[in-house]
Amino acid sequence: MIGFQTLLKKEVLRFWKVAFQTVAAPVLTAMLYLLIFAHVMANSTAAFPGINYEQFLIPGLAMMSMLQNAFANTSSSLIQSKITGNILFILLPPLTPWNFYGAYVLAAVIRGLAVGLGVFAVGIFIAHVPTHNIVWILVFAVLGCAMMAALGVIAGLWADRFDQIAAFQNFIIMPLTFLSGVFYSIHSLPDFWQRLSHFNPFFYMIDGFRYGFFGKSDVSVWLSLAVTAGAFLCLSAVTLSLLKSGYKLRQ
Amino acid sequence: MTYAIDVQNVEKKYGSFTALAGISLRVEQGEFFALLGPNGAGKTTLISILAGLTRADAGTLQVMGHDVVADYQAARRALGIVPQEIVFDPFFSVRETLQFQAGYFGIARTPALDSWIDELLAKLSLTDKADKNMRQLSGGMKRRVLVAQALVHRPPVIVLDEPTAGVDVELRQTLWGFIRELNAKGHTILLTTHYLEEAQQLCSRIAMMKLGRIVAMDTTEHLLSAFSERVLRVKLVAELPTSLLALRIRQEGINENSWHTFSIHDYNEVEILLSRIREAGATITNLEVTEPELEEVFVKIMNQGDSVPNATEQSIYPRGINP
Ligand SMILES: Nc1ncnc2c1ncn2[C@@H]1O[C@H](COP(=O)(O)OP(=O)(O)O)[C@@H](O)[C@H]1O
Ligand SMILES: [Mg+2]
């Protein structure tokens, strides 16, 4: 247990010591999106009746930032340790694959939540976002971040260089988050794109998360929960089996 | 009794390249053991497998009786590794580095731990660097932090992979003083080094590796007596008395004014040889006694290695030598 706690503390300190880059910078980015899109789209039709565009946008943006940062935390921590070689310090001790998985994922969830809170703290000044059900909000926030954290561990284990992580981020994570209905309700899309969105797991995370605020969503919140939890469990199973096999760490 | 390190028939390939071709090696508790061999012999690979950083293709390894795969937690707790390459975490100070390392090994932050860390820092002359960031340390200092990191969980078995590369003479003495102290307290030490005189002074037993095989393994004493000798060299103005010709093993220079070399087993022979030279009326102008050197042993074994590709514990000696 002490081993796990120590690794968790180290992973949290790793991003917290440079919180300006790892927490403040993504909050600033989200704020810029918010200001620009809210301005450009000011007259667009509301996604849900009684909810204006700014209100609609804030949870989506918060979730997008949380997902991206949870991924960034595990993947960049791992690739950094692998490249500098100091991954050795956690390979020599008697840490188990579960310790490893738990500490990395939890630290990334903490960073994700810190970024999400930051986005809301800024959002308050721009629009009032109601809270329909805090439990759904937390469930989707934590599960979404944990899923992305696990994906980040997989990417961090697989990659040998920084640019491979960057490619993963730019060509997979970014498009999927952008095309998940952060900036619009998918009901406003043409039929084909609407159907395609249903294959994007990120859509369910954002839709479910948004449900926690407005009590309204594009698809059933239970379906979103099932998809998010399913994705989290699958990726966790893959992560744990990679860690157990020593994939690219102990060869 | 349980061996500190027990390696049996370990093989490792990287692609089609054989890094370890069946290594068997046992180190008893409390031994000071050297693993020697040229670059690329497979020393680091063997240590990595022992530490669980690399997986063997075949064979078994145990540390203090714990299998490094099946019982990896107990095996790793028993093992302290000083890696060959210098690595560090630029986020932390020296003290933080050690506190975190102890934590990974499941050691709670207690006053006992704090005082052990202070002791390690003092023994390795790092006290004044304790709160410096790792980035601010020189290479030699970083290496000493790696030594402290390996010891922070008080492992009974300590493995040092070229710990003195890039460390200056004074600090090398400090380091070996400390490691000797640990050995005297019962810790088992396995080290690799290219400074053969270090191995000769420190280690009671030596294994030599070449191309992924062990080509010699014995006590330091036996290796030295089997492959190297103590010699007396004398320089004479006159020719060597004929009565001594049979005893001479080598002559350098021509007739008068040349060096004559005699093999000696103990120092009494020096006196006897010198008095016989004097009795014969020859004048000695220079004289030296050379002790056996591990370097000579090493060179001989490495050069003969090719002719004994299957050398094992049983067949490490050249014909005719009975250690
Ligand atoms: N990860 C690796 N991939 C491929 N070859 C390797 C790897 N690690 C070591 N080797 C090769 O294995 C051999 C043994 O290396 P090593 O164990 O580092 O030797 P030593 O420590 O005795 O100098 C070398 O020829 C080295 O090039
Ligand atoms: Mg080596």
Image (cartoon, rainbow, N blue to C red):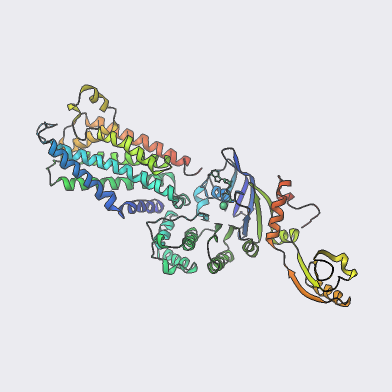
Q: Is residue A133 visible?
A: no
Residue B87 position within the rendered picture, expressed as x and y whole percent measured from the top left: 46, 55
Left or right: B17 as drawn, with respect to A198: right
Q: Is residue A151 above or below residue B220?
A: above
Q: Is residue A143 above or below residue A3?
A: above
Which quadrant does the C terminus of chain B fall into? bottom right
Disc tally is 0
Left or right: A179 as drawn, with respect to B282: left
In this view, the residue farthest toward the top is A191
Q: Is residue A195 visible?
A: yes
User: As rendered, which of A181 and A228 lies closer to the eye?
Assistant: A181
Residue B86 position within the rendered picture, expressed as x and y whole percent measured from the top left: 48, 56
Residue B17 position within the rendered picture, expressed as x and y whole percent measured from the top left: 59, 40
Residue A249 position within the rendered picture, expressed as x and y whole percent measured from the top left: 47, 44
Which quadrant does the N terminus of chain B fall into? bottom right
Q: Looking at the image, which residue is at 37% across and 38% down?
A: A236
Left or right: A177 as drawn, with respect to B154: left
In this view, the residue farthest toward the right is B243
Q: Looking at the image, which residue is at 69% across and 56% down?
A: B299
Which image quarter: residue A162?
Answer: top left
Q: Looking at the image, which residue is at 66% across and 54% down?
A: B207
User: As rendered, which of B252 and B180 lies closer to the eye?
Assistant: B252
Q: Looking at the image, which residue is at 40% across and 45% down?
A: A79
User: As rendered, which of B259 and B8 lies closer to the eye?
Assistant: B259
